[in-house]
Image (cartoon, rainbow, N blue to C red):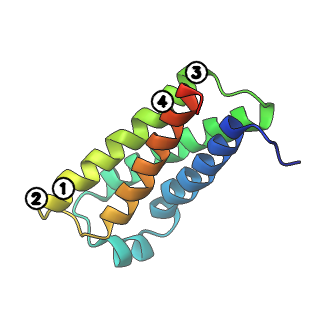
Amino acid sequence: MPTADPVLRLARLQAIFYGASGVWPLVAMRSFEAVTGPKTDRWLVRTVGALVATTGLGLAVAAHRGRVAPELALVAAGQAAALAAVDVVYVARRRIRPIYLIDAVAEVALVGAWVRLWRGT
């Protein structure tokens, strides 16, 4: 049943996004590389994917239980900020493809949403 609680909605949204984007390189590295470019350290891509998916799973469980602890919200926002920063820096350095800027926009939107919720607006 959908909830009216914006924190739970945001947690669900980020859980879906992180679940999909985190699992993608674990189950379909070829298609992941077709979109994002070839990778030299596939183990590292899989490690990051597993960590992102794990955060998504934690958010999904919290949303399902009806309560997102402040610490988990901080992890969610912090991870989104870190991923956005990595995207922007390494696109600027031409180490990764500009397609990653789409992810950066999504990550910044997640950070903004968490901040708005913390501020109560």
Residue 15 position within the rendered picture, expressed as x and y whole percent measured from the top left: 61, 47
Circles 2, 3 touching at the beta carbon (< 8 Å): no
Q: CA distance from mark 3 to mark 1?
A: 30 Å
Where is mark 1, residue-wise? 90
Where is mark 3, residue-wise? 70
Q: Quadrant of the C terminus?
A: top right
Q: CA distance from mark 2 to mark 1?
A: 5 Å
98, above or below 53, in the image? below
102, above or below 65, in the image? below
Q: Is residue 93 left or right of residue 78?
A: left
Q: CA distance from mark 4 to mark 3?
A: 9 Å
Query: Nearer the observer, disc 4 or disc 3?
Result: 3
Please state which amino acid type lies under the numbered disc 4. Val
Where is mark 4, residue-wise? 75
Please state which amino acid type lies under the numbered disc 3. Pro
Where is mark 2, residue-wise? 93
Residue 63 position within the rendered picture, expressed as x and y whole percent measured from the top left: 72, 37
Circles 2, 4 touching at the beta carbon (< 8 Å): no
State the residue at coordinates (42%, 43%): 80
Q: CA distance from mark 2 to mark 3?
A: 34 Å
Please state which amino acid type lies under the numbered disc 2. Arg
1, above or below 39, in the image? above
Secondary structure type for disc 4: helix
Residue 69 lies in quadrant: top right
Circles 3, 1 touching at the beta carbon (< 8 Å): no
Circles 1, 4 touching at the beta carbon (< 8 Å): no
State the residue at coordinates (70%, 32%): 62
Secondary structure type for disc 3: helix
